[in-house]
Image (spheres, rainbow, N blue to C red):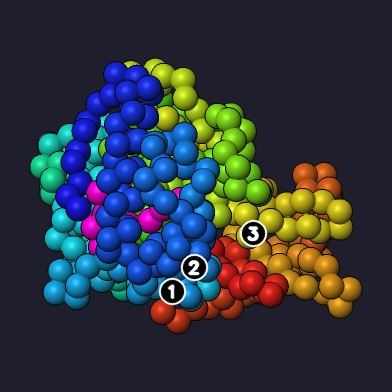
Amino acid sequence: MQYQPKLAFDSLHTQDEWQSKELKRLLQYLQAHSPYYQRIFKEHHINIDNIHGLKDMHFLPTTSKSDMQEHNWDFLCVTADKIKEYTATSGTLGKPVTIALTANDLERLAYNEQQAFLTADGKEGDCYQLMLTLDRQFMAGIAYYQGIRKLGAALVRTGPGLPAMQWDTLFRLQCNSLVAVPTFMLKMIEYANEHGIDLKHTPVKKAICIGESLRQADFEYNVLGQKIHEHWPIKLFGTYASTEMQTAFTECAAGMGGHQQPDLIILEILNEHGEPLKHGEYGEVTITTLGVEGMPLLRYRTGDICTVYETQCSCGRRSRRLSPVLGRKQQMIKYKGTTLYPPAIFDILNSIPYIKEYLVEVFINELGTDELRLHLTTPLPVDDCEAKLKPILQSKLRVIPLLHFHSGSEMQQMQFPPNSRKQIKFIDNRDFQFEA
């Protein structure tokens, strides 16, 4: 099943017409090659001939992360000799899922990232410094690498190394673009301030920021985005992606949401009952992959809560745009009558200068309800920190979680457990367990 790039649509109507035809092709492919979807179609009495396009998608069952964890290899649509790369999810929602890619899937992945970099003002003359993990079956690493090569730009693979090495490489090779996790960019800023590096006069002009949100629901920078931009006045481009979807939503210079790549992915926003919501309403991001050969997905519920905007972007693109992530469905916390999502807690803690590092933990207490604990590192005496912090939490969260203080080395061990390929800021110790 070869992907067929279509770079531009003159309207959402023509986009939807094209996607309707591609959906029918996908259903035929799944019916012929996917053990998982063959079984699901049979169990739900789905006759794919009755699905005529996007308007009929609500008749099709959805797929969840737990389905992929439980039936991983039933999603495979090709024989083993066709697989050219094995990648895996990070395990943030429990057991990691292996994603097998064919040569065609790898080419599609490169095309996806080429288009993502173009959306984020990428060009052939750029030099990108990749400050992220490129091993441990991390799909994003190979995706960025292949996408930059397809763009025709230069790159240097520094990985998530120490700030001193990053700055040395950056100046030595005059890299004008970064691909990095935003919180690591804060460490770069801290190092620069301590060592007299003028952040207003570096070769860097832009950064593709991965793994963490930079913006609030109104598209203004959140605290993390503000901290970076105030100190280091470069263009920041947010992204949203997952290993399973093999596709990215990337901001343009307008910063008004991640642009959908409609030739690669069908996007839906669903409520808790699996019903489609209108644009502007928040619900669960649900995707259908187009052109994936190895492990395509139909109506895959990501667990992320967003909304979609259909108005034309000021950049001129007519594609739909995905909002910043409000939170994850499974991460919702009901604490003392208040509904919380971890990103809101992160934003508050990021704004407090005497909180150096943190980890948010949720667990079930002896009453059977959600309990929230903040693990913190601070240079202040613990009593002083508590006295200053509690009123802020009460004001902004309306509740005061349990507070637990740690040394820097203890926090480092908590945030970077063995074999982890990214920093952990949230740990869920309820019945369903995952880290993020």
Circles 2 and 1, Cβ within 8 Å, touching? The answer is: yes
**In the shown orientation, is residue 77 left or right of residue 216?**
left
**In the shown orientation, is residue 256 left or right of residue 382?**
left
What is the secondary structure assignment of the residue under circle 2? helix
Q: Which mark is residue 331?
A: 3
Residue type for callout 3: Gln
Alpha-carbon span between mark 1 and mark 3: 23 Å
Instruction: Please name which of the two marks, 3 or 2, marks the residue nearer to the observer.
Output: 2
Residue type for callout 2: Asp
Look at the image and give the residue range highlighted in magenta: 291-301
Q: Is residue 358 above or below residue 349?
A: below
**In the shown orientation, is residue 404 left or right of residue 390?**
left
Q: Which mark is residue 339?
A: none
The answer to which of marks 3 and 2 sits earlier in the sequence is 2
Of all residues, the one furthest to the right in this rendering is: 367
Q: Which residue is mark 2?
A: 67
Q: Which residue is mark 1?
A: 71
What is the secondary structure assignment of the residue under circle 3? helix
